[in-house]
Amino acid sequence: MLIKNIDLVPINGKDEVIRNTNIYIKDNEIIHIGEIRDDIEVERIIDGKHKIAMPGLINSHTHIGMSLLRNFADDLPLHDWLTKKIWPTEANLTSRDVYWGSLLSMVEMIQGGTTAFCDMYFFMDEVGNGLEESGMRGVLTRGLIEDEGAKRKLDETRELFKNYHGKGNGRIKVMVAPHAPYTCSPDFLKESFKLAKELNTGIHIHLSETRKEVEDSFNLHGKSPIRHVYDLGLLDIHTIGAHCVHVDDDDIEIIKEKGLIPVNNPGSNLKLASGFAPIDKMLKKGIPVALGTDGSSSNNNLNMFEEINLASIVNKAVNLDAVSVPAIEALKMGTINGAKALDLEKEIGSIELGKKADLILIDTDKPHLYPHHNIISSLAYGVQASDVDTVIVDGKIIMEKREIKTLDVEKIKFMAEKHAKDLVNR
Amino acid sequence: MLIKNIDLVPINGKDEVIRNTNIYIKDNEIIHIGEIRDDIEVERIIDGKHKIAMPGLINSHTHIGMSLLRNFADDLPLHDWLTKKIWPTEANLTSRDVYWGSLLSMVEMIQGGTTAFCDMYFFMDEVGNGLEESGMRGVLTRGLIEDEGAKRKLDETRELFKNYHGKGNGRIKVMVAPHAPYTCSPDFLKESFKLAKELNTGIHIHLSETRKEVEDSFNLHGKSPIRHVYDLGLLDIHTIGAHCVHVDDDDIEIIKEKGLIPVNNPGSNLKLASGFAPIDKMLKKGIPVALGTDGSSSNNNLNMFEEINLASIVNKAVNLDAVSVPAIEALKMGTINGAKALDLEKEIGSIELGKKADLILIDTDKPHLYPHHNIISSLAYGVQASDVDTVIVDGKIIMEKREIKTLDVEKIKFMAEKHAKDLVNR
């Protein structure tokens, strides 16, 4: 496949824009970027006029089955939201609910330019099935809240790994997801760690999302959640730390030392009043902070361009510094840093020779993107989810001219609505 | 005209959603809401299936000619941004630049569901001409920065008023716009006030946007910018106060006492690192804070649904209170409070009997808006500019199924690009 005459934002570490170039894809790999090559046989040409090519966006922390609860409970204190609305309703979720909710989320993510995600939820085999169908790339993690069924949940993770890890031409990965230090005992955290070691995979865990959680940790363990998991030896393998909002300098040192990848979820952190993560500070220390949407019942969407914009502008105001988290850094958070979070840096996150072809084309022929002064600014501060024209994952076109090729969108909308209505009336 | 079988969010003070109703419009007025009426003759029916009707959004503070500088200068300290990039380039602006830039902005605003705006810029007759063509509603204000040409600028405002106030079936209004207390001397501020009195119109002024500006005011006048204009007697007529970010309790008392309408511009305040306005506090005191986008070179778009979302979620995090600025309050900020800002409360801002028909229809058949649990949440937290299907202003359809009826969008994109390129190379 050849994408011809296109402006390219490769996110290749040089912060460059390559004007009017050509991208060749063979199977699932990017094999040439530059001048037209007559020696490469081409079966398909995409015209890059009025388009920008950039790496597919990576949603590094989400709960995609929760889309059935979108716009269901809002403007509530966090505790009431969880205990009165979300948890009681989630207790009634069936595997089919999660299947249709997850597919709805995948449709939304594809339409917004997201090509890969890291999901933490349950009934994860259903998410895995949807993921195979959708053509997206993803990391599946079965959320492990410690309760009487904790042992079974660990077994489910082992099963999930056996059945899905590496599936879909390697598009699917499985990690281990102890939910958080405040929902898992030190022993159970260590059990989870052991399992991840055994499977030779990574960990996905919530860390320091709210101020209360951090205060509780100090009261209970005499230290922060991050220091706590560090002291337990949990950070010796690849770890995705969702949120990391209330982190102090000691936490940041640990994050840096251990290569923990924090995932900032600005939309959710704002809406749930969790607070402001010190993104600029972490980025300046060389920590590749990634980006996520969290679940769409606390956001209320899965729009990574919105998160990129928020990551940049919110941190400017917090730091009273208009130069904080510039456009290019926010774009990295949503692409290459996400690849690092998912432990897929060698495969995706940038458009470079030898990497897998996970990329998106943005339609710049929209009034709100005129005039065309600066492409990087435009991507971070102007582009909307609806401007994504084409989505390619693993070398396959899964959306073209906004039409999704892999999923039956009308059926998914209908089934998601039906399951959502059933669920809240159960 | 009849809009049939539609879900309606009227913003009528009762915070209600009216399901499956019918809206009758005659000429430019809403004449009936409720059951089907066979005695009303209808020439046109719009099917409300999968749609929400709500009042058109009101952008209460913007500089629409600045769209030519969108994505031109970003990630700079405010002072450098203004003095090195924006002001030198603006000095080269011609009236035709402003005409095409303003039309580009109107296209963007219509496509995002904005039906009315309050603009502060120069070459305002060009904006007035564009406004007449577009079919939108607007308040024109010639920005008055005091310099050697100050007298002439006041005369321009008087001319503008004479030529445009009341034009377009009353869609166009003119107010007087002394730029800010830090760019206008007390004497010049009083001159502006006298002119507004003489014309029996309102004032549009920047107030307390940045911390520095407030500190300077204390150093120079021994008081805040708001106390300063209050003491000068400037707040005795209708006043739109753009920004009001750094306001203290004394300022808030003045705002309340004088009925000054503050306009919050959350996107711009974040991106330019101006800070966080105490919106929740002002709303709770009964102050009808309105919303604006500011210019698109500091935003970088004119997307009022984005501002509504930001007004709600940013204030939750600032106050560490997930109940701050709930969805319905943010929607009011973007509609009825905007009508109050523009001194048009009796005419627009809600969908009620006898009001002018300025309304928009949202297409809810989008994956990111499924499932349909709560319409109010959906409008504040989920709806995107691109979900606006139909825009009606003064009883006329100016956009239908996303096609703008009043303007030549292709020509405007072309001419705006051309003028922008010329401008930055001048």
Image (cartoon, coloured by chain):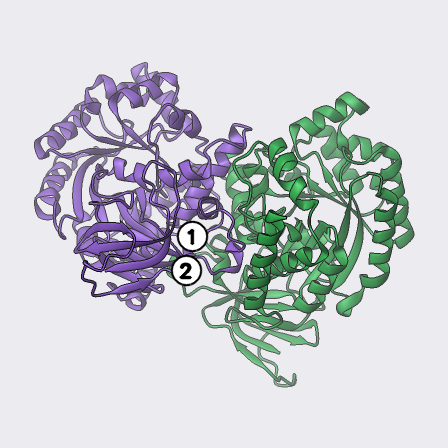
Chain colours: A purple, B green
Viewport quadrant of the N terminus of chain A: bottom left
Tell me which corner region of the image, top left, top right, bottom left or bottom right, holds residue B42. Answer: bottom right
The image shows residue B299, relative to residue A95, as above or below, that is: above
Q: Would residue A255 be visible to someone looking at this image?
A: yes
| Residue on which disc 2 sits | B372
Position in image of residue B249 (x %, y %)? 70, 29
Instruction: Report crowding for label 1: few under 14, some 14 to 19, many 20 or more residues within 10 A (C-alpha).
Output: many
User: Where residue B217 sits: x, y (%)?
Assistant: 76, 26
> What kind of element bears circle 1?
loop
Crowd tier of the residue under label 2, counting other residues whose Cα lies within 10 Å: few below 14, some 14–19, many 20 or above: some
Residue at the image position 62 percent from the left and 78 percent from the top: B1
Asked if disc 2 and disc 1 are in contact, CB closer than 8 Å, the reply is yes
Which of the chains bears the disc numbered 2?
Answer: B
Residue at the limit of the structure toward the top, as seen here: A222
Compared to B204, does B226 lie above or below? above
* Element under disc 2: loop
Q: Is residue A40 left or right of residue B269?
A: left
Q: What is the count of numbered marks?
A: 2
